[in-house]
Amino acid sequence: MKNGKLLEVNNLTKVFTKGQGFVKSTIEAVSRVSFALELNQPEIFTLAGESGSGKSTVAKLILGFEEPTAGGILYRGRAVANLKGRKEFMKDVQPIFQNPFETFNPLKKVQSYFFETERNFTGSGHGSYPLTDKSLELVGLSFAEIKDKYPSEMSGGQLQRASIARALITSPSLLIADEPVSMIDASLRMSVVNLFKTLKEEEQVSIIYITHDLATAYYISDRIAIMLRGQFVELGSVKKVLDNPLHPYTQLLESSVPAPDPKARWTEDIALSDLETREYTRKGCKFAGRCPKVHEICYEQEPEYHSVDERLVKCHLYAQDQVRCSSRPQIS
């Protein structure tokens, strides 16, 4: 591949319009987001932040579930907009959703998803499904554990592993996992998290891991981007960012170590809270209203990205460093 990138996200922006007639408002749910994953260098890249930060919207844009308002997404050097619906993209990029009980139809046997996926992507006939057996083995399940079972007859941990196994049938290069452990018991979370590490190290799969659980993010991630109201505010290696956070918002997250809260899940289809609306529409820094280190300029001018200690930080506090400052993050 000429540019050496598996995935490139360039200045990605998504604006949602709410209301009707003369009563309309716009929310920039994703604002000029940029990052890249290297080809043939698998990594776990985490998008982290509290509910309403735009993490899931980024995932939907990459998967083609939403159309970007501006910016672009390239997969293996080709625009994702031109690949939607194409078999090779659907085979190579697989989603894993938050709630496995919503992933599977409750009236349909779990095994049928495996058989259909294998038939669709390999053209194999009925009766022999070697990829199903292999993918289940990768996640620590056997076919006997899913045979003839409906989703309600399996535990949440088993069903989430089955969801991951179904995604692996196509031998994807990229998994996009949106809050994949927040709906399963704490005792089972680490087994799923360890599975992601194994997939990266042994199966050479890159993973975009979306979470507001910084503990699991720290454990499995190579790099992390902290999101606030649609923007990256700090991006770098997970150890740099979480061992010594520079942005005041990252410092707040790190000190509180928020636990996953499925009930706090944010979507574009529900009303934003007053705080979210104020921060999304704020003129200067989105965090100015809550920042303990706020200055007057923070209310008036959006900060630029500054390269500090091998990471990018979107904060006026680091303007004096004058180290490779730019209007948007570099993507490599």
Image (tube, grey):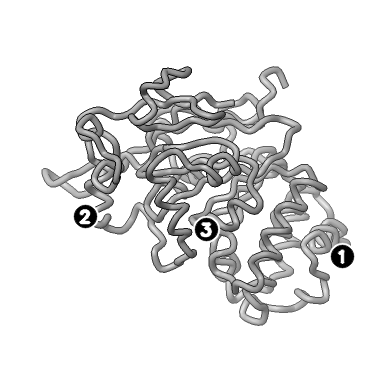
Write down the residue under mark 3.
213
Spatial CA distance of label 2 from label 1 is: 56 Å
* Left or right: 90, with 291 as reference point: right
Near mark 1 (Cα within 10 A), the count class, few <14, some 14-19 or many ≥20, is: few
The picture quadrant where one finds residue 90 is top right
Q: Quadrant of the C terminus?
A: top right
Place of residue 321 in the rendered image (x, y in percent of width and height, measured from the top left):
42, 21
Q: Amino acid at mark 3?
A: Asp
Q: Say whether marks 2 and 3 touch (CB < 8 Å).
A: no
Spatial CA distance of label 2 from label 3 is: 24 Å
> In this rendering, which labeled residue sits more in front, label 2 or label 1?
2
Q: Is residue 243 visible?
A: yes
Q: Is residue 73 visible?
A: no
Write down the residue under mark 2.
274
Task: Determine the secondary structure under disc 2.
Answer: helix
Is 310 located above or below residue 123 in the figure? Answer: above
278 vs 122, nearest the viewer = 278
Q: Amino acid at mark 2?
A: Asp
98 vs 258, nearest the viewer = 258
Write down the residue under mark 1.
127
**Residue at 69% across / 70% down in the picture?**
110
The picture quadrant where one finds residue 93 is top right
